[in-house]
Amino acid sequence: MKNLKERILELKKEKNAVILAHYYQEADIQDIADYVGDSLGLSQEAMKVDADIILFAGVHFMAETAKILNPTKKVILPDLKAGCSLAESCPPDLFKKFIDEHPDHIVITYVNCSAEIKALSDIVCTSSNALKIVESIPKETPIIFAPDKNLGKYIISKTGRDMQLWDGSCVVHEAFSLDKLIEVHKQYPDATIIAHPESETHILQTASYIGSTAGMIDYVKTNPNNQFIVATEAGILHKMQQEVPHKTLIPAPAKEDNTCACSECGYMKMNTLQKVYDCLLTESPEIDVPENIRKKALVPIERMLELSK
Ligand code: 13P
Ligand code: SF4
């Protein structure tokens, strides 16, 4: 009797499908994926896919971005409810009003938002290129940055730019506890703290490196230290540990009242191996982006990809 992973791999071949997975997916899903990456890498990979089906093991905005970039492919997501607190914080009608209240501003949106929000934007960014994208805008031009206020504050601290921030945040990265992080650092005084820029300012101030999930993995690979405290979603530890099997990786602790002691994203974890199998078998749920929205959303994503070459 074949196990679930073997059956998925067989079905993937039969259906001419590829599986793209984010680093926050459960380890078993990452292991059967054709590509595992951060948001930028996943977009670049999705654009190149030649197979008939893209199974996106990630959250809704990521699958939507894949569909926007490669519309002739069938894009399927194991669970349509796999959303994101950042995307949910930014409804298109309120965002349109915000833009109207700030005329003459360039609109930069973090990729963690819906296709409708991207369609209202001038340029998209991810955590790996946000600084570069902001710096590409002429200095005197004011900027609207949405929906992540924590990433926005971090960019302001680095660039001193005039940015109007949308009041959104990632529930996972806001769950880190500074007091508990300091306690853990006392236990591992030689450990280097690394953090994702969706984290709050007081967490970022403790970090020696701040970057995207792919950037964090590269950093632990190239940094000579052997101990790291990792402030991002715990799913990253799977790939990271495979890359540095002899190094010690300690997940940054979450606040007492968090549902998980080690900061897991409930949206990302809605995808399971069984749902991946069912999704491939039935080729559903499928991601659909209305063509008028898709065309408008494609422009700011392509601008970002051009600047990220
Ligand atoms: P990156 O993998 O692009 O750093 O993004 C992290 C994230 O929160 C995705 O939802
Ligand atoms: Fe959204 Fe945060 Fe989950 Fe990423 S980790 S999908 S930003 S809620």
Image: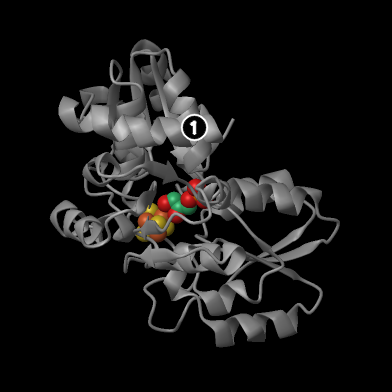
Above or below — where is 92 with respect to 229? above
Say which residue appears at 38% left-offset and 82% top-offset: 257
Say which residue appears at 34% left-offset and 31% top-offset: 299
Quarter holding the C terminus is top right
Q: Position of residue 232 (x, y in %)?
A: 53, 62
Say which residue appears at 39% left-offset and 62% top-offset: 148
* Dot 1: element: helix
Q: Is mark 1 within 8 Å of ligand 1?
A: no
Q: Is residue 277 left or right of residue 33?
A: left
Considering depth in this image, is 277 or 78 the residue closer to the camera? 78
Above or below — where is 298 with respect to 259? above
Q: Position of residue 96 (x, y in %)?
A: 18, 53
Q: Position of residue 133 (x, y in %)?
A: 52, 46
Quarter of the image holding residue 231? bottom right
Residue 253 shows in this picture? no
Check disc 1 and report the residue beneath it.
Answer: 305
Question: How packed is label 1: few (under 14 Cα within 10 Å), some, or many (20 or more)?
Answer: some
Above or below — where is 243 with respect to 198? above
Above or below — where is 30 with respect to 208? above
Name the colouring of the figure: one colour
Considering depth in this image, is 276 or 132 the residue closer to the camera? 132
Kind of residue indicated by mark 1: Leu
Q: Position of residue 259 (x, y in %)?
A: 36, 73
